[in-house]
Amino acid sequence: MAAAVGNGSEVEISDAEIDEIIAEAGGDPSQAIRNLLHDLAKLALDAEASVSLGFVRGRLLPFRVRGGP
């Protein structure tokens, strides 16, 4: 998996990891991106549900999820 660098704000992702993600999507890069965006949205929604809205001032999700809040 990706290794964090420095203070955790940067992440190095190898070509092998990218190839593995595309292979999981049956070789379709568009599906791989779709899967990653789905997982990212799910993680953001889970984090939003577990954090006080007042604490993050409603700025947790950097994008709007279709069908979401």
Image (spheres, rainbow, N blue to C red):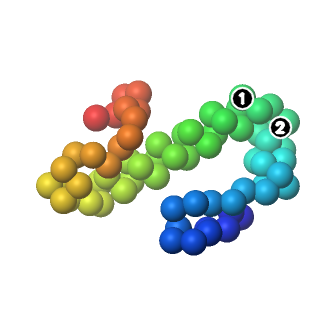
| Mark identifier at residue 26 | 2
Tag 2, which secondary structure?
loop
User: Is residue 67 shown left or right of residue 55?
Assistant: right
Taking depth in this image into account, of 2 and 30 the one nearest to the observer is 2
The residue that appears at 84% across and 47% down in the rendered structure is 19
Give the residue type that dot 1 points to: Ser
Does the rendering let one see residue 45? Answer: yes
Q: Nearer the viewer, residue 63 or 51?
A: 63
Residue 55: x %, y % from top left: 18, 59
Q: Residue pushed farthest front?
A: 6
Residue 38 located left or right of residue 24: left
Expressed as whole percent of the image width and height from the top left, the position of residue 46 reads 38, 54
**Tag nearer the camera, 1 or 2:** 1
**Which residue ends up furthest to the bottom in the rendered image?**
6
Q: Residue at x 62, y 60 (%)?
A: 11
Q: Position of residue 44 (x, y in %)?
A: 41, 49
The residue identified by callout 1 is: 30
Q: Residue furthest left?
A: 54
Say which quarter of the image contains residue 50: bottom left
Name the residue: 77% across, 33% down: 29
Q: Name the quarter where the C terminus is drawn.
A: top left
